[in-house]
Amino acid sequence: MLNAVGREIPEELGMPYKGEMLQPSGRAAGHLIKAARPHEKKVLSGIKEAIIKSGLKDGMTISFHHHLREGDYLVNMVLAAIDELGIRDLKLAPSSLNNCHEPVIEYIKKGVITSIETSGLRGSLAREVSGGILKKPVIIRSHGGRPRAIESGELHIDVAFIGAPCADTYGNLNGVDGPSAFGAMGYAMVDARHADCVIAITDNLKKYPIQPISIPATLVDYVVCVDSIGNPEGIMSGATRFTRSPRELLIAELASRVIINSGVFEDGFSMQMGSGGATLAVIRYLSNAMKKRNIKASYGLGGITGPYVQLLEEGLVERFLDVQCFDLRAVESLKNDRNHIEIDASYYANPFNKGCAVNNLDVVILSALEVDTDFNVNVITGSDGTIMGASGGHSDAAYGARLTIITTPLMRGRLPIVVDRVQTVITPGSSIDVVVTERGIAVNPKNKGMEERLKDAGLPICSIEELKHRAEKITGKPDPVQFGDRIVGIVEYRDGSIIDVIRNVID
Amino acid sequence: MLNAVGREIPEELGMPYKGEMLQPSGRAAGHLIKAARPHEKKVLSGIKEAIIKSGLKDGMTISFHHHLREGDYLVNMVLAAIDELGIRDLKLAPSSLNNCHEPVIEYIKKGVITSIETSGLRGSLAREVSGGILKKPVIIRSHGGRPRAIESGELHIDVAFIGAPCADTYGNLNGVDGPSAFGAMGYAMVDARHADCVIAITDNLKKYPIQPISIPATLVDYVVCVDSIGNPEGIMSGATRFTRSPRELLIAELASRVIINSGVFEDGFSMQMGSGGATLAVIRYLSNAMKKRNIKASYGLGGITGPYVQLLEEGLVERFLDVQCFDLRAVESLKNDRNHIEIDASYYANPFNKGCAVNNLDVVILSALEVDTDFNVNVITGSDGTIMGASGGHSDAAYGARLTIITTPLMRGRLPIVVDRVQTVITPGSSIDVVVTERGIAVNPKNKGMEERLKDAGLPICSIEELKHRAEKITGKPDPVQFGDRIVGIVEYRDGSIIDVIRNVID
């Protein structure tokens, strides 16, 4: 059966993507009700004791969050302890996985981990999963889809492990203090609310109560203190610098001109900006235009970076809603500036609550590994067909924003980025308004009037087919990737329907 | 059947109080899952439109919160609209009710309200309920018992009405900005998480997103703007001044000497103080002792008052955990001081979560309408047997604290306060350590060693029977109140078991 973006979804996998957002029904899964006696102690001797007390057993589901990014010690540390305790057949359900999680491969081989649900996978772990190391397909969810799945009970977490840069002895947690400070705890906040058992792991134990409290003690069962929860250099790996690449600067300039001339660039507009070099350059161009026209943004959303923070400090943006910080300047801002507000992943992007933050976006700038002539975007699989990225908030922000802009070079290496058909659809073309490349800008025909507006502004508009043609003229048509028949990944759309599957790559 | 405090609880009413805290099992009731489309509007034209959109129907349950205290306009305003819409047979389930809610009597007579669940009732409404105006008994819950009941599903809220001193157009709410600022929104936060429909009513509508966010837009269905949600004078009716009564000052001095000599008065101790005149005097005595001995408290809990705030400002208390502010100085402090932390009622006192704040209390000072020779405390019914107070956080804090002190005059008017048997048990004697009156201090024999310590400190210790004797010597033994056979109130203990019932008073 073909779903609404023309992908064949085997019936037994679940509801195929319909093109329209599904409507939810019923009630959320209730959390396990527990009681704590007065003056009980929650601090345990170590991770193993906490795992034993949690009641973790074969076949259960464990969760982590990826705010420590490439510096994360937690996943490997906890899996080592679980392995030593002889627990097997676990589902690993972190908010995302990074290159530093290569050791997970060994735990898969040992049978400790037998399935994975995540926003993304990188490095050798991603390659192994693409090759079929797991018996069950990995489930890929967006940052809004994950809280939806957790709240509905689709993803039930037995034990959540939360890395806490600051924890007190009773389990209040925050991410802004201590040697491993990473800032907003947005993804972990959802796990804490719903997991049967919550184990906080910290390298900065304080007396009760700390401030601020991002995750309250009422949700935390145990606290464990370790030497370090993360490598500060890796934690801040999301940090990026302004690009000096002429191509990226050109894309950024074009993208900012698209925003300025789109019709949504007016006082009080809202925006989400990512962390790529081109996006940071967009921020710079845009802030100049805002000053010139005396326009202020009502709020900025998304993973927050230092250059983005500067807009807040200059009063060009009134508030930040922050689910994840990408650098130390963002962490400091979250800690000290009341207009920089920490939010959880459900607040950020869950389509099934009473109103998430992406719903009010005017503009979002997103990247792409591939875009196709139906404007579908791939941010998960590389040109060789293997998993190498993450769904992230891509489809969430794209759905919510009035104006969704994809910025991408037309080619990478000798490969075209605008293609007939993306390897994997993360975000359906119906959510995309404009694709900006260094060699032309394509407007989705569904966005009536936008093409004229941008043409009138002198922007180099062409059709998406023309972009594809321009790319292929230089790169040629690459040989198609040879996929096998095995499904190694299922891509859930944010509403839980299946927008695509990822098949194994044949070497 | 007699429960653990010797009260006869008819079997059909539910589980009688066992003396030991019940242990919970199972899962919380899940919230209703809804979806919001991007750029949808939540602001409606008025309360009636919101009620209609909420789907409120005969037989449902509506909730309110009592942070606006004697200034609250919401209950009366909403009930008027409901009445006009012809909706009947509702359960009214606010966190508490005050004198200003006298109009509820009319809505009971009209059949709009047919049952009530609350922490307390005052004034003529309380007298009518005591007289039997409701067919079903009112259910009295503590501030910790209410979130327990809501989370478990025992109290299911169909529509929650939340008075918001500051709301944005998408339903983010806070209590610290605007003409009706009342401070912490602790009770309403629980309703917002669990009610099927949440209607925010504000007199201070702002654009999205406000800061701080106490209740997030993800939980709010509709926003209604009205001229005023409360009378500022009434809102701050919790505010009190230092007492000049020699009797209250004496009680306060004795109470502070009890704390100082109790063994828990050491650096890092924690405390909950109420808002009565005597308690404010305790704060003053205690702060002098803290300065003298260089002792600092780790946190202060409970409804927060200006004199209490002074301790935070002077650095004598490191943090406040605030579920409810009692005066403007507390509101200002919550707004501006990061060490003044807003908490919800579940965090404050729910016995069935992973660790509420009362669990870490060292000292609490509580008041009493009556204490009996088993140390049971009544704070709900007056000397004439009618309802006139509220359960509040009394039994919650008393259970959690290492040292629970009751301060009370030995007599009020010509009536003894220490008696053989309190009219109504709110807090079982097992939670009480010391009763301080102006004519002697009684220590609960269960607290071994405390009596000796306080005697050694030169405090005027006697038995609780002796206190009763001293009172009766002056007042005589009052005639017993004549109760009827009808049960007009059920007092739930914080774990949901029934600690007492209130019978109708025969005039």
Image (cartoon, coloured by chain):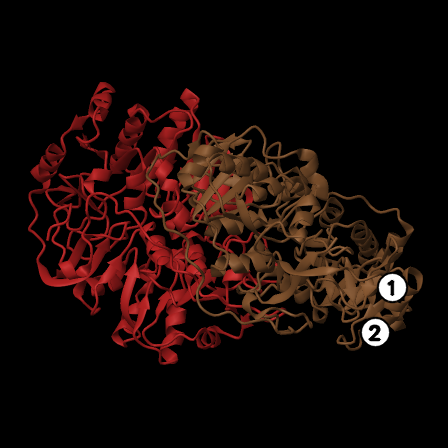
Chain colours: A brown, B red
Q: What is the chain letter for disc 1?
A: A
User: In the displayed structure, does residue B106 sit left or right of residue A424?
Assistant: left
User: In the displayed structure, does residue A237 sit left or right of residue B309?
Assistant: right
The disc, 2 or 1, on the residue closer to the chain's N-terminal end is 2
What is the quadrant of residue A329 in the picture? top right
Residue A111 appears anywhere in the view = yes
Q: Where is residue A52 in the image (x, y as percent from the top left)?
A: 42, 37
Q: What is the chain letter for disc 2?
A: A
Residue most extreme to the right: A474
B374, B235: nearer the viewer: B374
Q: Position of residue B78 (x, y in %)?
A: 40, 70
Give amino acid for label 2.
Glu
- Mark 2 and mark 1, same subunit? yes
What residue is pinned by disc 1? Answer: A477
C-alpha gap between disc 2 and disc 1: 28 Å
Residue located at (75% from left, 67% from top): A264
Task: Judge the density around disc 2: few (<14), some (14-19), many (≥20) Cα neighbours within 10 Å.
Answer: many
Q: Where is residue B387 in the image (x, y as percent from the top left)?
A: 21, 57
B400, B313: nearer the viewer: B400
User: In the displayed structure, does residue B103 sit left or right of residue B4?
Assistant: right
The residue tagged with tag 1: helix, strand or loop?
loop
Give amino acid for label 1.
Lys
The disc placed on residue A422 is none
Question: Foreground mark, 2 or 1?
Answer: 1
Q: In which quarter of the image is the C terminus of chain B?
A: bottom left
What residue is pinned by disc 2? Answer: A451
B44, A96: nearer the viewer: A96
